[in-house]
Amino acid sequence: MGRPDKAKRAAIVQRRADAIELRLAGVDWLTIARKLAADPSINSDRIAYPQGYGCERYARGQEPPADDQLINYACRDVRAALKERAAEHDEKADELRAIENERLDKLFFVAYKQAVREGSLPAIDRALRVMERRARLLGLDTPTRTEITGRDGQPLEITTTSVDELEALIAANTEADDDE
């Protein structure tokens, strides 16, 4: 069984898109699987869905897949479709980053020329802002380490408390607030 031809690939892409749309609409896995099944005897629309689940079995006149197999097919389709969509989004984000980087190059060039030629403080500030934006866009800055300490820079002491102890502490603090 080689790679499917163009028409079969298009039908599979459509099936996956349909599976995602049904899942987003809150349809359960078995209903999705039956709606997208190739065999009209189990297809909820009583049609042979193109490149539907179990299409090879249907083409050979065999019994349709069991419910658990159908559910597995639907789950795999949704996972594959989501993975493909995530990859597309990543590619688009990379393209947008590249375009944005080109824009920043042009803006930086103008601000840098003015900053160097004239020594203009606003132009220097603008050039620095463009540089900061590029660093954020490309993740060039290393993260800042933040450390939380207790009194006098000592390590924080973390203890566990039971619900009863917590309620007693709350009650004690509430009484102290009432006394003030």
Image (cartoon, helix red, strand yellow):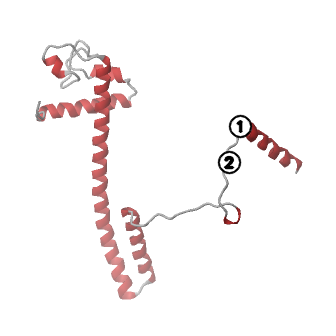
Above or below, comparing residue 145 to residue 80 in the picture: below
Q: Residue 42 in the image: state x and y as whole percent.
A: 26, 14
Give me the residue at 13% from left, 18% from top.
Answer: 59
Asked whether 149 or 126 is in front, the reply is 149
In the image as oriented, which residue stretches furthest toward the bottom? Answer: 118
Q: Residue 1 in the image: state x and y as whole percent.
A: 11, 30
The numbered mark at residue 159 is 2
Task: Assess disc 1: are there few (<14), some (14-19) or many (≥20) residues with their C-alpha within 10 Å of its C-alpha.
Answer: few
The residue tagged 1 is 163
Q: Residue 28 in the image: state x and y as whole percent.
A: 38, 23
The numbered mark at residue 51 is none
Asked whether 10 or 147 is in front, the reply is 147
Give me the residue at 38% from left, 24% from top.
Answer: 27
Residue kind at label 2, given as amino acid type: Thr
Badge 1 element: helix
Horizontally, residue 174 falls left or right of residue 41, namely right
Asked whether 21 or 58 is in front, the reply is 58
Give me the residue at 34% from left, 20% from top.
Answer: 31
Give me the residue at 28% from left, 26% from top.
Answer: 73
- Alpha carbon distance from label 1 to label 2: 13 Å
Above or below, comparing residue 119 to residue 131 in the picture: below
